[in-house]
Image: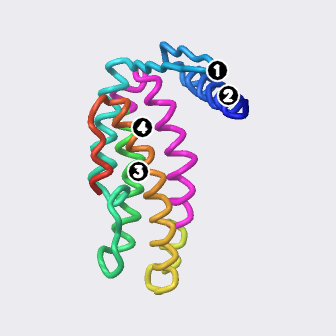
Amino acid sequence: MKVKEAAKKVVSKLGDIFKRFELSEIALSPTEFNITISYQNYDKEAAWLMYVELLTRVTTQKLEEGTGDEKTALDSIYSLFASTRQVLREKGRKAINFTKISVIILNKVIRPFTAKWHKESLGGAFEKLDKCNEFRNELENLRISLLKYSRILAEMAGVEDMSFML
């Protein structure tokens, strides 16, 4: 009985999520569920463009100790705003599912990180070892979140997710 109740809760939550993002063809029942998510071609195109941006940056590549540069990494993360805005200008009106997800990621995941570290960097944070270590720890947490985002984008784009190779 407890398994069926847990399944009902999961099915209910999944249904809510898919309804909220206006994804189509959701068939849910407490004992069995089949979910077919279909995206418009514009969603697929936009997701592919953003997937490439994420997969080829420090956003998904671990910045190993003793390598790289904190300011350059911060600039790379920050440039995602321009990249995303460009994709939104090109595809956004017709790529509604992509738009909803990307705006949330920018404003709720990336912006708090860049806002904090932009101010810190202006104050000379990257000249201090303890601040560099703090930055790298927070960058690693952001990277893990953005790997999840990249997996969503791969699914939306209809491509094999290569983030597992990173």
Counting other residues with Cα less than 10 Å from the Cα at mark 2, is it few (<14), some (14-19), or many (20 or more)? Answer: few
Q: Nearer the viewer, residue 135 or 146?
A: 146
Give the residue displayed 63% in from the left and 31% down from the top: 10
Q: In this view, does 68 lie above or below 28?
A: below
- Which of the labelled discs sits on residue 152, or is there none? 4
Instruction: Name the mark nearer the viewer: 4 or 1.
Output: 1
Q: Are marks 3 and 4 in contact (CB under 8 Å)?
A: no
Callout 2 touching callout 4 (CB < 8 Å): no
Residue 86 in which image quadrant = top left
Mark 1 or mark 2: name the one nearer the start of the chain: 2
Is residue 132 magenta-colored?
Answer: no
Q: Are marks 4 and 1 in contact (CB under 8 Å)?
A: no
Q: Looking at the image, is mark 2 or mark 4 nearer the viewer?
A: 2
Chain part drawn in magenta = 88-117
Residue 36 in the image: state x and y as whole percent.
44, 18
User: CB under 8 Å between callouts 1 and 2?
Assistant: yes
Question: What residue does disc 1 label?
Answer: 30
Q: Please, what is the three-letter code of the amino acid marked with disc 1? A: Pro
Name the mark nearer the viewer: 3 or 1.
1
Instruction: Looking at the image, tell me whether mark 4 or mark 1 is earlier in sequence order.
Output: 1
Label 4 crowd bin: few (<14), some (14–19), many (20+), radius 10 Å = some
Q: Residue at label 2?
A: 4
Side of 15 relative to 35 (left or right): right
Marked residue nearer the N-terminal end (2 or 4): 2
